[in-house]
Image (tube, grey):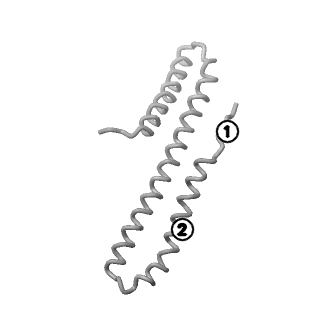
Amino acid sequence: MHKEYSKKVLFWTMCIFGLNLVLSLVFSWYGKDTSIFMYSIPTTGGIFGATVAFYLNKAKIENVCKGKIQFFKFKMKYLEKHPQRAEDIESELSAVDSALNTKIDSTIEESISEDITIQN
């Protein structure tokens, strides 16, 4: 099975962060110098956290778009079954359609314009 790129990035950043934690515990157990982990754990953890946030935002946008497609399919089936009530159906479902469009637009705008802050 072929994984999508974002899942691969998520997996590998999780592995690097986890390996970093395990190595720090091993170094600590054997009394080795662990000062490097003061920097590497927050760095790899921050990268992993940013990757998780990116993946969740991407999934949210995909799910909202899938919802829009499902809504459109439902609307077409319903209009097909009840052509005589097309005007009533259109007016009722336009509010739902508008809400979905607003959600899609705001989610995309938020993901594009969101500032990335770096903490030192």
- Which residue, given by chain and number where applicable, does mark 1 sit on? 117
Q: Nearer the viewer, residue 17 or 111?
A: 111
* Outermost residue to the left: 1
Q: CA distance from mark 2 to mark 1?
A: 30 Å
What is the three-letter code of the residue carrying label 1?
Answer: Thr
The x, y position of residue 83, in whole percent, is 35, 83
Image point 36% across, 86% down: which residue? Answer: 84
Instruction: Find numbered disc 2 in the image and state the secondary structure of the residue it sits on.
Output: helix
| Label pair 2/1, CB-CB below 8 angstroms | no
The x, y position of residue 91, in whole percent, is 49, 80
Q: Is residue 45 above or below residue 82?
A: above
- Which residue, given by chain and number where applicable, does mark 2 sit on? 99
What is the three-letter code of the residue carrying label 2?
Answer: Ala
Label 2 packing within 10 angstroms: few (<14), some (14-19), many (20+)? few
Q: Choose top left, top right, bottom left or bottom right for residue 115.
A: top right
The x, y position of residue 44, in whole percent, is 56, 29
Image point 56% across, 19% down: which residue? Answer: 28
The x, y position of residue 4, in whole percent, is 39, 40
Q: Nearer the viewer, residue 5 or 50?
A: 5
Q: Is residue 25 above or below residue 102?
A: above
Q: Nearer the viewer, residue 47 or 72?
A: 72
Q: Taking 49 as reference, is 1 left or right? A: left
